Amino acid sequence: MKELIGSPGTLSGLVLRLGQCGFAAASIGVMASAAGFSSYTAFCYLIASMGLQMLWSFGLACLDIYALRRNRDLQNPVLVSLFVVGDWNSSYFNTTCNYCPYVTAMLSLAAACSSAGVTVLYVRDLNFCRAQDHLLCGRFEISVVLAFITWALIAISSHVMFWILASV
Amino acid sequence: MKELIGSPGTLSGLVLRLGQCGFAAASIGVMASAAGFSSYTAFCYLIASMGLQMLWSFGLACLDIYALRRNRDLQNPVLVSLFVVGDWNSSYFNTTCNYCPYVTAMLSLAAACSSAGVTVLYVRDLNFCRAQDHLLCGRFEISVVLAFITWALIAISSHVMFWILASV
């Protein structure tokens, strides 16, 4: 199997997963700190989608750490056969579900875009943000930008996973 | 090369492309018929994105028709060598750009979601549609649904193209 940047079980993959997790958490944090977000369906969906993404990325990051440790063990060849690694690899692929990154990438893009639509409507189209001081538009904007960064990282990840799936 | 449903130069591919083109055109038509859509950034973006999609799908449909005609000529073997077909296939792939469906699928999803965010905000969150009669919320909703159908067709198309690209 080719070693692609961001493929599961590599250091770049771990960094990617931790980045996804971190940006998703930041997006949730900023959005949750803006009072009154819960009356907007799009913002609630953003939090739900980013929450799912955070949990999923965290799970994958844990698997990556486990894989990296196994590989370190492999360099001191003690009772570890290639067969076990091959078998473990296939089960890793089955458990993490090859289409999942594709689906979560779409969910995150949908959440980020619907929230961006509402934010742009408030900030530019209706000028609600200037008229009503209680709306924390700045936080909405930051949260949407963080969600887009999360989506970009997931898109890279899903692209790599799909490439591996197709080339296996 | 494997023959996948919806791959370029097949009848299923042509139907898929015409479907994309038709639903995109319907989405633009319904949205454009709703007065006052132009004051919303998200709806303008929807029209721009669906317009791009329509032109691109129409171009691909024309190429599919050309390919289907060439294949019919092939069945009466007159002066057509396999080399020419192979060469023509590779130039077809180069000209239509393998990553383009992937990018247009993302653009359509982004447009559909941002418009859906604004529509849901108006219909459910703020109850603007009941309060203000001049807003044609029904047309906004139909247009968004048509945009989502277009996106689903493009997603199938881009999936097939990416699969072909990865397996070549």
Image: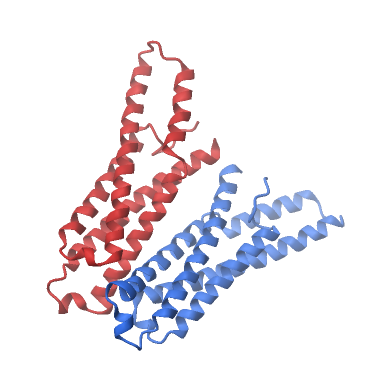
Chain colours: A blue, B red
Residue B126 location (% of width, % of height): 25, 79
Q: Is residue A12 above or below residue A55?
A: above
Q: How many marks?
A: 0
In this view, which residue lies farthest toward the front? A130
In this rendering, the answer to whether A62 lies above or below B16 is below
Could you tell me which quadrant the C terminus of chain B lies in?
top right
Q: Quadrant of residue A70?
A: bottom right
A90 or A146: nearer the eye? A146
Q: Which one is in front, A97 or A115?
A: A115
Q: Is residue B142 left or right of residue B17?
A: left
In this picture, is B19 found above or below A20?
A: above
Counting from the top left corner in percent of width and height, residue A58 is at 60, 70
Determine whether, in the image, residue B119 is placed left or right of residue B8: left
Q: Out of B132 and A49, give the one closest to the viewer.
A: B132
Residue placed at 41% from the left, 46% from the top?
A: B101
Q: Nearer the viewer, residue B36 or A48?
A: B36
Residue at the limit of the structure toward the left, as seen here: B133
Q: Where in the figure is residue B167, as x and y percent of width and height?
A: 54, 38
Task: Give the quarter of the image for residue A158.
Answer: bottom right
Q: Position of residue B71 (x, y in %)?
A: 37, 23
Horizontally, is A37 left or right of B54 in the view? right
Residue located 58% across and 72% down the image: A22
